[in-house]
Amino acid sequence: MSSSSEDPSQLVHSSQSENSSQQNPLTALEAAGITSATIKPANNPDFENGRWFPTWRPYRGDLDHNPVGINEYLPPSKSILLGIQHTFAMFGATVLAPLLMGFDPNLAILMSGICTVMFFMITGGRMPSYLGSSFAFIGPVIAVTAYAGVGFNANLDVALGGIMACGIIYALIGLLVMKTGTAWIERLMPPVVTGAIVMIIGLNLAPVTIQGISANQFDAWMATLTVLLISSVAVFTRGMLRRLLLLVGLILSYIAYFIMTNVLGFGAAIDFSSVTAASWFGLPGIHAPRFEMSAIVLIAPVAFILVAENLGHFKAVEGMTKAHVTPYMGRAFFADGIATTFSAGFGGTGVTTYAENIGVMAVTKVYSTTIFVIAGLVAILLGLSPKFGAIIQTIPPALLGGASIVVFGLIAIAGVKIWIDSHIDFSKNSNLIIAAVTVIMGTGNFSLHLGGFDLGGIGTATLTAIVLNALFNSQKS
């Protein structure tokens, strides 16, 4: 989910969206007025050396005044601390997304670390990014698996097959971009389209979220308390605390829930027996995918959402780092697609670049990609602790429901922010129709069938937005 240290909406994209972005509404950059349009990248022969990896050099500047470049590295002690900070920044969203889909959060943490290291290698260390669980998959996965929102997802294998197919499509798009550039993507999915798509990711999930916390009044009140605590962290704190609003808010609500249930006797008490029984070190459970065409057709269109989301992330990174990263976007798309396929192949979630971590870079001015390798290694260590995973599994559904209200709401608003930041002119009927039809289709979960395949609400709305834009805006320069 994502990320400015000053803007709680950054948490989303993940989302999504989106954590989510087109000069991502989820990044810290726009709050500071920094975009790829405002800063022209300077020539850096060490970065643009014609080889797969840039020419690495030690950082020689003053950390209080000079940024650390993508191809610069800090001493090990400072690098480790900064890497741990990036792990904390991605933690809340990377754990929450698998819980909302019934995946193993420990495995998701492990895969996020492995995939981040893979991303570094495939992109040649030229794109500073952390790969965490993508919220864009939540709606399609819930639709495919009929997940009830509590416990392990019994139909996880079907969702994994769909996510793998999505990752393969995404990787193929990356190869195409490596050959042709990004202009065609920006024409296919301009801000009026991407804003609507991001918005419906959040709105489509709203009914599932509310139903999941309405079983009884105690759960409803605890979910409301969770919303208030997360919101308070977002509004009244600063710095790292604000970037960790999901994590800190859930910890506070967890403590409150424990007191209300285990101490005072209200509601269902938290059972810690699984935590006691779990070992400190061990591999999380691996799950094999199953390929069903109906699930693939529903989940595969998420590839286009990931393209739109990450396009904004990478443009923002270019503006912030003043480095020519646009020529390497194809590598980045390809790397994210391969990482998503790899993660789902073992039972993990689909992954995406995280705006949370872009926000950390915006604050620290440390852009070195070596820091993300360290963050990935820290995540791998956490993922290899079953006891850590067992603690995560004790989080009550009511608290997850409250966190979902915040996250999905922020995803929806992130779509609006894309329109605002891109100055979309809704006095033009073409833009008005594209946005209106897409949002209502996605929110109402209107679904078309192709043969025997169900596109689902998000898939149908995404396809509709792209088609309407091609019809109505094809003559725009």
Image (cartoon, grey):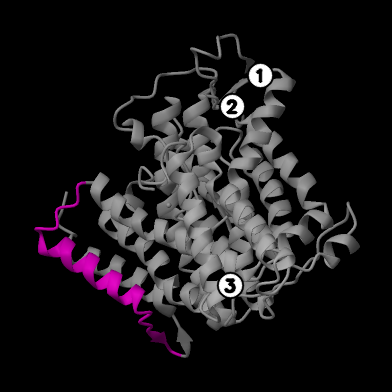
Asked whether the residues under the numbered discs 2 and 1 touch, taking CB atoms below 8 Å apart as contact, a structural biologist would say: yes
Q: Is 410 situated above or below 216?
A: above
> Which three-letter amino acid code belongs to the residue tagged 3?
Gly
The residue depicted at 63 percent of the width and 63 percent of the height is 98
Mark 3 vs mark 2, CA separation in Å: 34 Å
Asked whether the residues under the numbered discs 1 and 3 touch, taking CB atoms below 8 Å apart as contact, a structural biologist would say: no
Q: Is 288 situated above or below 325?
A: below
Q: Which residue is mark 3?
A: 162
Looking at the rendered structure, the secondary structure element under dot 3 is: helix
Mark 2 vs mark 1, CA separation in Å: 8 Å
Looking at the rendered structure, the secondary structure element under dot 2 is: loop
> Which three-letter amino acid code belongs to the residue tagged 2?
Ser
- What is the number of the mark on residue 368? 2
| Residue interval drawn in magenta | 423-451
Q: Which residue is mark 1?
A: 74
Instruction: Give the left or right position of residue 193, taking residue 281 as reference.
Output: left
The residue depicted at 66 percent of the width and 39 percent of the height is 121
